[in-house]
Amino acid sequence: MALQRTQPRVSTLSLRHVLPEPLAREQWAEIRPVVDDRDLLAAIHPGGVSSCSYRGWLGAVEDCPLAATEEARQVELSNNDCDTGCCGGVFVTVRRDGPFVLWTDWENTHDIRTPSPPVLRFDAARYDAALAAAAADVSWEDPVHTAARLVARALGDGEWFARWGCRLVMVRPYRRTFPADIESPSVRVLFTPADSRHTYYGLGFTVTGEEPAEDQAQRFAARILASDPRESAKPCGT
């Protein structure tokens, strides 16, 4: 009598957006992996925050933190609102294997006593759809995040900064008063001369409730794109 082969379990992945605390280091929404209807990080790193923020979904979906290719790569899944080299976190290796995506080789540098999950196997087509859905979902946004997302998209290719010998570093929302000279909430753009590793320039604007965030973002992006961005920026580090 032939032995029946047990088929490997195929899990389902969805991604949940969670707004950060006002004082959190990362001000974009956390994107938390939900595996088989269970918040994975709540089980293996309670109290930690997801290292996969919406900032990583602002570009092409295939470049987002959880994107899977045939080349295996280690992904940082969580941290303690701190650098993982300092305070630890959870890591997993992600790779595409034919019609599946595999999560393997778990590492928990936050608490080695916590049992690691087993190898997780996802249907690749559904996995890719979950990543695309996370990129398209903006239902979680408050006005400052809407404004930051639109500014990031307007400046995302970096072509305008390159024309002036500069490199765009990041676009970031702030839900709190930081830096001290900017009222909260605000959006900040950070860029640097292409030939410098130590000089940075910052531009920012306060997001008010007096008009739609879309209009404020469009006006701010147009101001940056009108001329050399250094003309209206403030040096913020050397």
Image: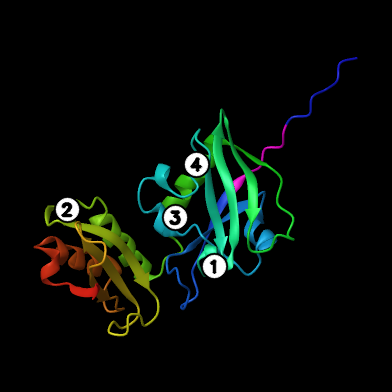
**Mark sitting earlier along the chain (2/1):** 1
Residue 156 higher or lower than 93, as above or below? below
As shown in the figure, which amino acid type bears the numbered disc 4? Ala
Residue contact between numbered discs 2 and 1, judged by CB atoms under 8 Å = no
Residue indicated by mark 2: 162
Q: How far apart are marks 4 and 2 (CA)?
A: 33 Å
Residue indicated by mark 1: 86
Report whether 11 appears left or right of 132. Answer: right
Q: Distance between the residues labelled 1 and 3?
A: 32 Å
Mark 1 or mark 3, whichever is nearer to me: 1
Viewer-side residue, 188 vs 89: 89
Q: Residue furthest right?
A: 1
As shown in the figure, which amino acid type bears the numbered disc 3? Asp
Q: Distance between the residues labelled 1 and 4?
A: 34 Å
**Mark sitting earlier along the chain (4/2):** 4
Residue at image x 13%, y 72%?
Answer: 232
Residue at image x 86%, y 20%?
Answer: 3
**Mark sitting earlier along the chain (2/3):** 3
Mark 1 or mark 4, whichever is nearer to me: 1
Q: Assess disc 2: are there few (<14), some (14-19) or many (≥20) residues with their C-alpha within 10 Å of its C-alpha.
A: few
Q: Assess disc 1: are there few (<14), some (14-19) or many (≥20) residues with their C-alpha within 10 Å of its C-alpha.
A: few
- Quadrant holding the N terminus: top right
Q: How far apart are marks 4 and 3 (CA)?
A: 12 Å
Residue indicated by mark 3: 137
Residue at image x 20%, y 68%?
Answer: 220
Element carrying mark 3: loop
Q: What stretch is highlighted in magenta?
A: 8-13
Viewer-side residue, 173 vs 90: 90
Residue indicated by mark 4: 129
